[in-house]
Image (cartoon, rainbow, N blue to C red):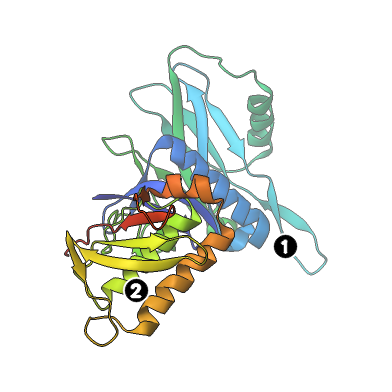
Amino acid sequence: MIDTRVTLDGIVGPYDCKWTGWSCLFSLDTSRQVSSGTMEMADSYGYSCVETIHVIDGREGGPDTVIDSGETYVVNEDGERAACAVAVRVRWRGKSPTVTPIPVTPQVRRAARKAKNRKPGRGAGPARAAVICVHWQWVVDEGSGAVAVIKPLDDGHYPIGGREWPWCVVTWECACGYTQDWPDTECLCGLSRDGQPKAPLGTAGVRVSQILRALAPEATSVLIDLTGLARVCAVFAGDSEIDTADDTGPFVTETLGCADEVLRLAMDEADVPQDINASGWEHVSDEKSTALYRITFPTMTNR
């Protein structure tokens, strides 16, 4: 079981959940968010192609609760309509709420209206909740059989949607350009999901590291001069300077030129003093330049 984030077909979400390998488990609070998302999809695409989640609230010792969706469908060529609706009765007494699907009748509708108008908080004991899934594509033929009760697991999480639901794991894009699944918190470049640069210059530093490490994987830092046009002055592997000569070192002129161009474009977008501080660039004292900085590259991971 892993902690991750998912969307429903990339349309609603993301939602925090636990992934078991075959289903997504949601806390009650997140189940409420999923409920809102499924209702949003039903409103947009129609109930006939969307299963909706509903969280019903009540209190231990309180009266039974009835809900009614109020949907309708066309029953004949004349356009007459009938209720495409479901109803459930929740008994809040006992160790856990008991949810029973029931036929939609005029009496049930009246009870639903009364329950809707009742002041919240009636009943003794702590607040309770029940979670159900309505399979709207089956309602016309199966009525109350189209309602599935979702029971919480021992840890309080609700398994919503199995393999048939189009859950999509959320991804995050590292500043280096690689895309990772949400549970993978560390990128191969050495940056973490939560440690992404917040400023353009920080992102530029990561991209410079990618350009230089493509030919010199041992590179750990670089000196750049921001006087005039930004440029790379020296590349280091630990305390040792890497030869940057075109004919003797690992780099070619085009490599350093690409790194320089990344820095210059970032400088055009940056709020320089603030971005330099936010990016963690280290000022280096130098007799010839007052704008010499060291960019330390993230430590690459092996996996």
Mark 1, secondary structure of its residue: loop
Q: 47 or 302, which is in the foreground? A: 302
- Amino acid on which the number 1 mark rests in the picture: Val
- Where's residue 142, x and y in %? 52, 56
Q: Residue furthest top?
A: 124
State whether residue 32 is above or below residue 269.
Answer: above
Categorize mark 1 by other alpha carbons within 10 Å: few (<14), some (14-19), many (20+): few
Q: Residue at x 36, y 54 (%)?
A: 287
Q: 123 or 35, which is in the foreground? A: 35
Q: Residue at x 66, y 33 (%)?
A: 107
Mark 2, secondary structure of its residue: helix
**Number of numbered discs visible in the structure rendering:** 2
Q: Relative to 77, is 270 on the left or the right?
A: left
State whether residue 31 is above or below residue 62.
Answer: below
Tag of residue 257: none
Quarter residue 106 falls in: top right
- Where's residue 299, x and y in %? 22, 58
State whether residue 90 is above or below residue 3.
Answer: above
| Quarter containing the C terminus | bottom left
Q: Residue furthest bottom?
A: 247
Sequence-wise first label, 2 or 1: 1
Q: Are marks 2 and 1 in contact (CB under 8 Å)?
A: no
- Amino acid on which the number 2 mark rests in the picture: Ile
- Where's residue 33, x and y in %? 51, 42
Is any part of residue 261 visible from this angle? yes
Residue denoted by label 2: 211
Q: Residue at x 26, y 35 (%)?
A: 154
Q: 97 or 224, which is in the foreground? A: 224
Residue denoted by label 1: 75
